[in-house]
Image (cartoon, coloured by chain):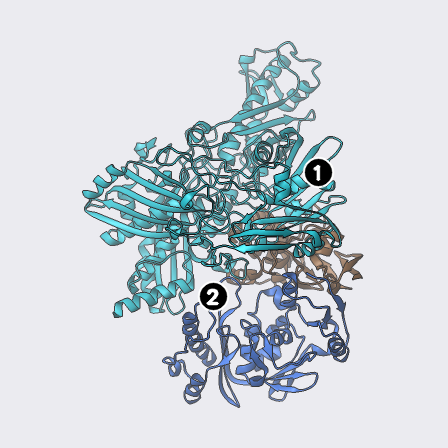
Chain colours: A cyan, B blue, C brown
Amino acid sequence: MTAATGIGARVLRTEDKRFLTGTGRYVDDLPLARATYAYFLRSPHAHAKIKKLDISAAAKMSGVVNIFTGKDLVDAKVGGLICGWVVKDKHGEPHKAPPHPVMAVDTVRYVGDTVAMVVANSYDEAKDAAEAIKVDYDVQPANIDLAKSFDKGAPQVHPEAPGNLIYDWEIGVKADVEAAFAKAAHVTKLDLINNRLIPNAMEPRAAAAEYDKGTGNYTLWSTSQNPHVLRLILSAFVLGIPEHKLRVVAPDVGGGFGSKIFCYADETMVCWAASRVGRPIKWTAERSESFQTDCHGRDHVTHAELALDKDGKFLALKVETIANMGAYLSTFSTAVPTYLYATLLAGQYTTPLIYANVKAALTHTAPVDAYRGAGRPEATFVVESIVSKAAAEMKIDPAELRRKNFIPSTAFPYQTPVALQYDSGNYPPIIDEAMKMADYKGFEARRAEAKSRGKLRGIGFSSYIEACGLAPSQVVGSLGAGVGQWESAQIKFNPTGNVQVMTGAHSHGQSHETTFAQIIHDKLGVPMDQIEIVHGDTATTPFGMGSYGSRSLAVGGSAIVKATEKIIAKGKKVAAHLMEAAVADVEFENGTFKVTGTDKNVPLAQVVFAAYVPHNYPLAEVEPGMDENAFYDPANFVYPAGTQICELEIDPDTGTTEIVNFTAIDDFGNIINPMIVEGQVHGGIVQGVGQALMEGAVYDKSTGQLISGSYMDYTMPRADNFPSFKLGYKVTPCPHNPLGVKGCGEAGAIASPAAVMNAVHNALAPVGVKHVEMPATPLNVWQSIKGAQRQAAE
Amino acid sequence: MYDFTYHRPKSVADAVKLLKDKPEARAMSGGMTLIPTLKQRLARPSDVVDLGAVKELSGIKIEGANVVIGGMTKHADVATSADVKAAIPALAHLAGHIGDPQVRNRGTIGGSVANNDPAADYPGAVVALNATVTTNSRKIPADEFFKGLFETALADGELITSISFPKAEKAAYMKFPNPASRYAMVGVFVAKTASGVRVAVTGAGGCVFRVKAMEDALAKNFSSAAIKDINIPADGLNSDIHGSAEYRAHLVGVMARRAVDAANK
Amino acid sequence: MSISVAMTVNGKAVSGKVEARTLLVQFLREHLGMTGTHVGCDTSQCGACVVDVDGKSVKSCTILAVQAEGSKVITIEGLAESPDKLHPMQEAFRENHALQCGFCTPGMVMSAIDMVKRHNYQLDEATVRRELEGNLCRCTGYHNIVKAILAAAPAMKSAGV
């Protein structure tokens, strides 16, 4: 296809014009006639019994239409929210599954737990009335400190999960790993915390719903990353509305990062109440509500040990992790610290033996689930931190130690000891390129120069691997997933030759409307302006699994390719008829069907027209119409890999860290649109640096109040926290999908926390600091330096 | 936000009358603190008296050895004023680093000083420069104005009309911002004026305070070396997830030294 | 309390009845149906709601509608001459891929235009980054936003806007 617009081209985005002119349409923008507005009363306590809930005064307030409580849902036999992934523990038992009522009935379990829904003529009136609801709470002790969750006497979150334990899970053979440790020349030990994060998509979660009394149909607009999955959960498990009577629309969605995958209480309530209220209902979270009720991410406490031989070859890795689930199990929460975490602990290395034990804990905090990278950033942080620590301890250059242990390019497909089979990769050229771009050789001179200015300069590596493109259905099914992980596509030509492409993937910033159109343009030769990518509406798109886990292109894009193949196959039959040739002699190129070896040809648009106006058409053999569906189930995950190098300076007087240089070289396989890929990497890096240096969800350890509950206290990365980034690519195409692509959405966030923290540790080593936890805030760094000074003085 | 009755008086006299007549009324200057407070339903005034139309409250004048800034003068106007830049560049610098550009376009000096948020920047300048706060009824010296956490000498219904800053021989403000909110976690304003050397600290405690030991040392020798061994006790300083009291105490020293260095440039 | 309010939005005279507590952003979105201006936080920090009021960049979530009485307001909807002729800043955002989900974009673009004008069309990277203090973006990592603004400054100058 034309190099300017096809696969590999830097094509400007189709979606930009509406976003740039204020004509995007997000959930809160919907004009719904006669709409009512919902406000949710949330629990102010981390753990309390509801002794009495009195809505009588509130119900009489101005503008109030209806008030619902947990009891109404019990009476209506509404099911609870579900966890869709059954993880079996080390004894083969399914995880503990405590109930998750949509609204609290007799107990609240975190600050923000939903207590009542007020529906009123305006949002302010709903909020006014919510303040008049009288709740008599009997406050109970709360389990907030993750590391102490299993202690005797820790407050219990659910009776169904004694000792707050959801599962005690393991992978690998412990005895083999212990034997390898016994023979090790060197063992590096590391305790670390993967800090709890709050996703903070800039568009707060929102929902709106409408019920059509005549047809009995519900329409739910939701800020969802996966409208079909949301509909499936609501229909099959929660509300019992038949799937064909519920339409879920996710229009323009302002970022997700995982937090909009899950089925939440508020959107469930908005949908359920729409038929009871008899008018449309709108709800949009306030930001402080998002802080309290969006699923949080990460939150692990980990101990890791790496065994090495005398030359620095990795012999074995063992990892023990406690993972926070929060107060209830969110939609995919159980899978994140197991199959999306421990299976990544091989990293880019030939570590022959790995054992990981993960215990999932309940706490009186907001539910924790997938957040950009979901498990893989946590794993990368463990692996890349301990590798750098081992390098420092053994006085081996950190790049050299990595190179020594890289899986060689000749070893692919490579079976790791933790279940995954890496399909492709070539790691040494990546780190070489990164070191060149980052001028690693010149670092010591720059460190010396910084020192002369009183600054501590450090450099850190992170060579990450991730498994994305979620996911081969039978693999994840065998591991407990409740759904398939294929993706769908429908290519629907119109008689006039333009085309609508429905995808089950959902774009909330990822640029599908451009990237997917490039694929169609490339494969079918349709001009870009004749292609419309349609997504996010269960009424108009085939059932799809949505967007998360860097899957849209690798899985959704592959489904589109499959559908183009069907279009071409059918088109060939029609074209053969039109050109009076044998089907076997027809070829398709650049949007035109040709008879091989002749100048006979017919453009696709003409074939499409013939298919819809089949006057001269092989009706006996071929159906009319040009409309093809495809479903693509990947053969394996895809395995992007790369190396990031972070260089930073610390001001020891204040503890402030400034990133001065940041390099990322990635292998995402083939690239459809480099501009879009770079944008994904930039955003990912900043979120990862946010985790490393700035962001941290902090609950008061005794009361369970969310202290970092607004932008006043939760540090969001801002423009002046960063330099411009240096990016580059190496390409080893994915061997098992038709585009040869891997995923790029999460890589930046997966790799960067380790790159930054390795640089922080490198910078602080000369002043005796051994370990700094994330986020390495100025306070945290300063205290670490102080601590080291005190220790040195003793 | 709870609803309220809105007033937009055109003169100080009318504004003062409204505030005196309505005991639950609140004056609003730029609204950069009041509106967020109302949005969070942390206050429930019966009436809001918007000072936005009171023209006499805005403007910057040089009066002899003083820079006089009207109470409703926006941070952006102070930051870009040629008069302020020439007379007290540190004050323009301070104003140019309050909040973000949008806040600076609305927020006012009078609002900031009257609110006396412990993390606000202006109180540091008012105290260090030994400014005089003029209200509709009197003049209040800086040292008598700030009384404690969100507390000032202003009586109910009393409005700041202007603040008069004596020109400084040397002055600088150094702020260590809270990483999340970007408010001052510690801000130190150091000034050498006709009335002597003053060191005022904002952000660190419940209210702006002076550091006598530093002032004395700097009076003898206005250099950062003169204060390098002066430590601030952590007792009573603010403590939160971004800064312990001990850390803040340490930062007061660092920011003070950097401010002195900047003032000497 | 219901108050009449009138102002000019994107060159058009508009009016309506609001409560005293109605914010300018609510007036724009709910009364006028101009939903291009967004609300991303409740503490006046994210900047998704930035508009221009009488030539000054302000956060429309932190100004009452009644305070804008008689003002000239410009929003994201008022920038492009036509759907095919974007403002140079909008064009630069597009050319530099300075937006992903689009939610922060209206405020980003409005702040960016104000920034360029205040700095007399002359900006460097450090200044742009510092001046973006009041605008949060979770998608782009700011890299391409900074690039776009630096590219737009001379473009705005030559276009005379």
- How many marks are shown on the rendered structure? 2
- In the structure shown, which secondary structural element does the residue marked by tag 2 occupy? loop
Image quarter where the N terminus of chain B lies is bottom right
Q: Is A701 or C159 nearer to us in this picture?
A: A701
Q: In the image, is C149 to the left or to the right of A157? A: right
**Relative to A343, is B243 above or below?**
below
> Which subunit holds the residue at mark 1?
A
Q: At label 1, which amino acid type do we have?
A: Ser
Whole-number angstrom distance, CA of label 2 to CA of label 1? 46 Å
Tell me the chain of label 2: B
Return the x and y of residue B47 as percentages of the image width and height: 73, 69
Query: Among all residues in the image, which is located at the extreme front?
Result: A51
Answer few, some or many: residues within 10 Å of disc 1's Cα (few below 14, many 20 plus, some between 14 and 19): some
Which percent across, then down, holds residue B116?
58, 75
Q: Quadrant of residue C64?
A: bottom right
Q: Which residue is mark 1?
A: A275
Pick the front one: A250 or A444: A250
Task: Out of B101 and A288, give the one closest to the viewer.
Answer: A288
Q: Residues within 10 Å of mark 2 (few under 14, many from 20)?
A: few
Q: Position of residue B235 (x, y in %)?
A: 43, 76
Q: Is residue A432 visible in this depiction of the protein? A: no
Q: Secondary structure at mark 1?
A: helix
**Residue lying at 58% horizontally and 41% vertically, measured from the top left:** A224
Mark 2 or mark 1, whichever is nearer to me = 1
Say if mark 2 contacts mark 1, CB within 8 Å.
Answer: no
The amino acid sitting under disc 2 is Asp
Q: Quadrant of residue B46?
A: bottom right
Q: Residue furthest top?
A: A620
Residue A216 percent location from the top left of the image: 71, 32
| Residue drawn at (61%, 40%) of the image | A74
- The residue tagged 2 is B240
Residues behind callouts 2 and 1 on a single chain = no
